[in-house]
Amino acid sequence: MTSDAPPSRKGGHNQATQRPMSRRSASRNPPAAFDVEAARAAFPLIAKRPDLAYLDNAATTQKPSAVLDATRNHYETRNANVHRAAHGLSDAATAAFEAARQRVAQRINAASATEVVWTRGTTEGINLVAQSYADAVLREGDAVLVTEMEHHSNIVPWQIVCARRGAELRAARVTPEGCLDIEDFKAKLDGARIAAFCHVSNALGTVNAVRELTGLAKRAGATTVVDGAQAIPHYPVDVQELGCDFYAFSGHKAYGPTGIGALYGREALLEAMPPWQAGGEMIEEVRLEATTYAGLPFKFEAGTPNIAGAIGLAAAFDYLDGLDAEGLRRHEERLLAEATSGLLQIEGARVVGAARQKGPVLSFVIDGAHPQDIGTLLDQQGVAVRAGHHCAMPLMQRLGIGGTVRASFALYNSSADIERLVSAAHKAKTLL
Ligand SMILES: Cc1ncc(COP(=O)(O)O)c(C=O)c1O
C-alpha cells in the first residue's frame, strides 16, 4: 500500500520535506473498472445492512475494509508516538505517518508534503487559517469575502476574526437556482484581503468554478481559502491547477476515518504565518524566556497527532485511486439523475439547487410537508437522509426556506437505493 511505503529518510521531522510522488508512480496497478457490487462488498457496514439505503454521505461516508484494516494494522503492529522516541517502533510509526502525509500531498498535487498540515477536519483547517493567517494580516477596514452558500464552518471563523480585527465580512450572493452570482463576487472582491468559498456546496451540490474564482481573487489581491469538504470524495483535486492559497478538507467524507483532515497551504504563506496552537511537537527549542518553532508543517501541529487516522486516510485515498475515476463519476451522476427524475414524479416535490454542474447531492422539499417529518418517515422505511438547514442557515434564508431533505450519494449507492428513496418519499407524501 502506498501509505505504508517507507520514506527515504528514517524518523524525524524532515520526512515531511520530501516531494510527493508523481501521480503516475503512485498507482502501481492500472485502475480497475468501476463495479458497484464490488464497491458495496468492500464496505462492511453496507454489506451487512441490505435493509438500509444510506444516503447521508455528505454528512459522513462509510469506511471500506482497506481503511479499517490499515488503522487496525497500525495499532496491532507499530503503535507508538511519532517523531520523538529513541526506539524502532516509534520510527516505524513515524515512517507510516509521514508516508501518509506524502500520500495526501500527492493526491491533491501539493508541491511538497510540507504544505500539508494535519487537522481534525475542514472546520479545524479553516479555523487555523482564520486564527493564524487572517488574524495576522487583517487590518481595520479590510474585508473578508465569503458566499451565501457556505457551511457555517466557512462563515463563523471569519466572523470571529473580522470582529477582532475590525474588518468587514461580506457575502457574495447566491441566485435562486443556487449558483454563485459571479458579478456580485467580483464586485465584492474590491478591498477584500481574503476570499473563502466552497468547492462544492454541501446543501445543494453546486460545483463552483474554483479556478475562475481564484483567478479573480488573485487579480484583486485577495488570498483564497477553498472549503473542499464535499469535493474531495468525488473529484480529483489539484491545488496547483486550482490556483488556491489554502484548501481544507475532512477525511471522513472521503471514506477515511473521523477526526483527521488536512489543510493545504502555499509554502510561502505557511512560512510567514504564526503558530496557532502551542505545545509539544511544534517547537524547536523552549526556554522559559522564549521559544523557537519547528519548521513546516510541524509548526501548526501541536500535541500528539491522530496517527492512525492519518494512516487510515492514506488508505482511503489508495482505495479511491484504485477505482475507475471516470466510471465512478458517471455512476454518481447517474444516481443523481435517477433520484432527481424519480423525486420530481411526486406531486408537490421540488428540487432545491439547479446548478448545471452539481455534485451527487439532491436537496428537495415537498409542499405541505416539513423536511424533518419527511426525514423521519424515510428513516422508518430504511432510508437514511439528512433534513434541516445542513449547517447553511444563511443559504436557507437566502432561498426563503427553512430547510430541505438532502439525499447525498456515494460510490457504493445503487439504483436500488434510489428506488427505495423515491418510493419511500412517495409514501411519506401520502402520509403527511
Ligand atoms: C462544505 C462543508 N464544509 C465544512 C464542513 C465541516 O466539516 P467537518 O465537520 O468534517 O469539519 C462540512 C461538513 O458537512 C461541509 O459539508
Image: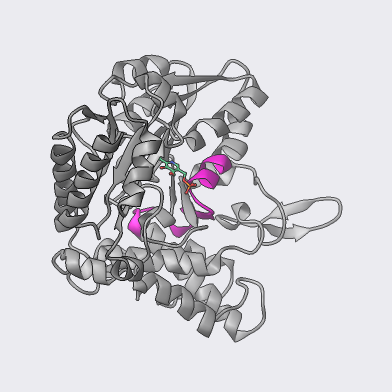
**In the displayed structure, does residue 391 sit left or right of residue 106?**
right
Looking at the image, which residue is at 60% across and 72% down?
82
Quadrant containing the N terminus is bottom left
For the residue pair 306 and 432, the one nearer the viewer reads as 432
| Residue 100 picture location, percent across and down | 44, 67
User: What span is colored magenta in the figure?
Assistant: 107-128
**In the displayed structure, does residue 263 sit left or right of residue 424?**
right
| Viewer can see residue 178 | yes
Looking at the image, which residue is at 35% across and 21% down?
399
For the residue pair 68 and 307, the one nearer the viewer reads as 68
Looking at the image, which residue is at 83% across and 57% down?
287
As for residue 179 lying within the magenta part, the answer is no
Quadrant containing the C terminus is top left
In which quadrant of the rendered view does residue 203 lie? top left
Vertical side of 209 occupied by 7: above or below = below
For the residue pair 380 and 101, the one nearer the viewer reads as 380
| Residue 279 picture location, percent across and down | 72, 56
List the single residue furthest toward the right: 288
As for residue 108 lying within the magenta part, the answer is yes
In which quadrant of the rendered view does residue 178 lie? top left
| Viewer can see residue 57 | no
Instruction: Check the image and tell me how it is coloured.
Output: one colour
| Residue 205 picture location, percent across and down | 29, 38
Tally of numbered tags: 0
